[in-house]
Amino acid sequence: MNDVTAFPFPIPEYGSEPYWAACNEERLVMQRCAACRRFRWHPAPICTHCQHAGFDWAPLSGRGRLYSWTVITHPVHPAAVAKVPYVVVEVELEEQPGLRMISNLLGADPVDIRVDAPVSVCFERHPSGQALPMFRLVPA
């Protein structure tokens, strides 16, 4: 897709195909080491914690807390012009301390965003058809 009005989208690379396939089913999954049972993000051929090579793809709850965020106000891609401002977040997932993902936060006024705010995953379709995991604040 060469349309400059569409955000770039991920192209599955080494070992990430199961992750993107699960996203298309609106499920969040992650590699989990067969030895130490710790999750790892990004997908890798060996565990970043114990160096074991075995793993499975395990479902995640999709719940977490905001660890950090930034509000993007300057479009760096032509497709971003209509989207600014938008919020990029680092979410710590509830399954494991230190297990974090970078994504977007949808539907939130930047003045309402707080460190440690609860969030939950949602999925948004890219024009390519790929579902992308995003997050929303959990109402109080």
Image (tube, helix red, strand yellow):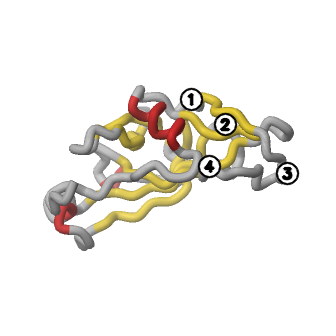
Name the mark nearer the viewer: 3 or 2: 3
Alpha carbon of mark 4 to alpha carbon of mark 2: how far?
16 Å
Left or right: 69, with 32 as reference point: left
- Specify the label residue 100 is tagged with: none
Residue picked out by circle 1: 61
Amino acid residing under circle 4: Pro
Left or right: 90, with 3 as reference point: right
Residue picked out by circle 4: 43
Amino acid residing under circle 1: Ser
Alpha carbon of mark 3 to alpha carbon of mark 2: how far?
18 Å
Residue picked out by circle 2: 95
> Residue at the spot x=16%, y=62% of the render?
4
Alpha carbon of mark 3 to alpha carbon of mark 4: how far?
15 Å
> Residue at the spot x=60%, y=28% of the render?
59
Give the mark nearest the N terminus, 3 or 4.
4
Residue 103: x, y in percent?
43, 52
